[in-house]
Image (tube, rainbow, N blue to C red):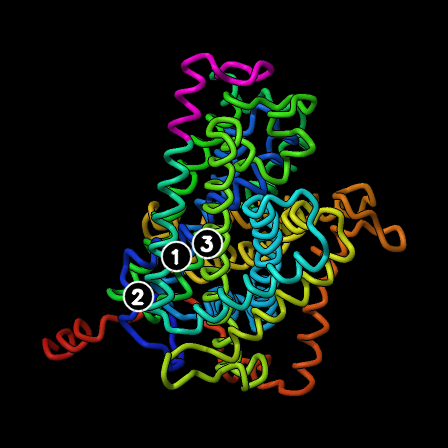
Amino acid sequence: MHEETQMHGLKTKGLKKGSVSQWAQVTIGLAATAPAYSLAGALGYGAAGSGYQLPIVFILSVIPMFFVALSYKHLTTAAPDAGTIFTWGTKAIGPRVGWFGGWALLLGSVLAGVAATQITVISAAVIFGMHDTPAWFHIVVAVLFIFSTTYLTTLGARESSRTTMILTFAQYSILILLAVVLYMRVFQGEAVSTAESFSWEWFNPFAIPSFDVFLQGFMIALFIFWGFDASLAMSEETDGNSEQAGRSGVIAMSITVFTYVVFAIAALSYAGIDPSHDSSLTHQNNIDASITTLATNILGPQGAIVAALVICVSAFSATMSTIMPSARMALAMATYRAIPKRFASINEVTKTPKFTTWTIGLMTLLIYTTLSLMSESIVEDTILSVSIAVCTFYIVASASCALYFHRTAFHHWKTAVSQVILPATAAIILAVVAVLQSWNMLDPDYGSSGSIAGIGMVFIIGVLTLLFGVILMILWNMFDPKFFRGETLPLERAHMAPDTAAEEIKSLNR
């Protein structure tokens, strides 16, 4: 007997195999987490919520994410399919769960693009020396940003991945330089007067003031860690085998958590969290643009421009890296007849889902324009709201891994832990967190945009838009039910299969 752990019935989609190197695949995962722009948008809010316990909140938050990364690794090895969450959820759990997981990823990618657009607008205002940004400036920057990222993504996987590698190297170089300067200032006694000196107490989980404080920090951490999995949607286009492709997500996650913890310590030690000090991470003028504030304080006006540029680069590469997997997700969904067939088209020249990519880009622009007219702080509200979508498709991935491998994993304790126990633990943790966070989002005072009919705007953005996918799923089921009947992508689990060669030898010996 041997393990049969390869998913069957998967279809090729016209993507170009070998167009993305293995290192480029890791880089796409790093670019999607976007350390510069993620820290710019989330560091201030994370410090405001978790205080000096932010480093330990980052570390605790990444534990279930590592479990999710393991799920991605095993599932990519079993099914290197561009549909990732959608395909795995459908094969391991069922078509409706797979469809909803795919919708959650698409929604999360679009909302992340909205956040990246707003951060780019803020950074562009710094570059041009604008203190007040009129509505036309937001729209012009948004149009230029979204159209350029979408266009570059449609050029081809090889070209897109090379561009991403260059941009990622640039932002990491500047972040490393900025962190070094921050540590030097702290060691020289030039930190902000209200900042506390580094203490190992910052790594004490029992010093976190309350569970609500941890939950808020966890949701922000979830947003900034999200993206390591972006590269795995390129597995059909990557050099090497599926096991090597699956490993890239774990590598990207490891580099990301180290970067965030090291930089968070430097920022807290230098700037502190006193909201009354104009150089603090949590000051009202800094909380949306903490990286720019840090660079201004230590490098002067020119430093602020450099920081703004690297944040723009980070947001640019992150948006490209999230458009790529979401477009391939939609491509897979259309290939298996889960959404209209038009989204399964591949451009003959570039071998990319060009129509789908432009559709996602235009959706991002539309949602950004709408929210910019409604929300006082798109960055905060989108970061808080996108976390529910991220939780949802990570739950689907983790549960899919546990259910798909549960018949074969328990022959050895290592595979049982890696393929079933840890993924199931991640799914349970994320499910609890998602429910608690959704409840908190109902509060009209949660976020900065108020409420509609007594329901918090963050809840509307994050939860109701996610549940809107159920309506779309029902409508498509009525129009074309073949996918939902399991005809195009049937349910399947890993199983023990007879060793044919061994059986033949036994029969001959008889």
Question: Compared with residue 167, is residue 62 higher up or lower down, i.e. above or below?
Answer: above
Which residue corresponds to the image point at 66% horizontal and 57% vertical from the top-left? 137
User: Do callouts 1 and 2 mark residues in contact (Cβ within 8 Å)?
Assistant: yes
Residue labelled with disc 3: 32
Q: Is there any visible trace of residue 440 in the rendered image?
A: no
- Between the residue at mark 1 and the residue at mark 2, the CA separation in whole angstroms equals 10 Å
User: Between residues 114 and 213, which one lies in front from this camera angle?
Assistant: 114
Residue 184 position, x and y percent, is: 39, 20
Instruction: Point out the image quarter for the C terminus.
Output: bottom left
Which residue corresponds to the image point at 54% horizontal and 37% vertical from the top-left? 292
In the image, is residue 310 part of the stretch drawn in magenta?
A: no
Residue 46, disc: none
Residue 507 position, x and y percent, is: 16, 78
Residue labelled with disc 2: 20
Q: Is there any visible trace of residue 493 in the rendered image?
A: yes
Sequence order check, earlier mark of 3 and 2: 2
Which residue corresponds to the image point at 72% horizontal and 67% vertical from the top-left? 468
Residue numbers of the magenta segment? 179-198
- Between the residue at mark 3 and the residue at mark 2, the CA separation in whole angstroms equals 16 Å
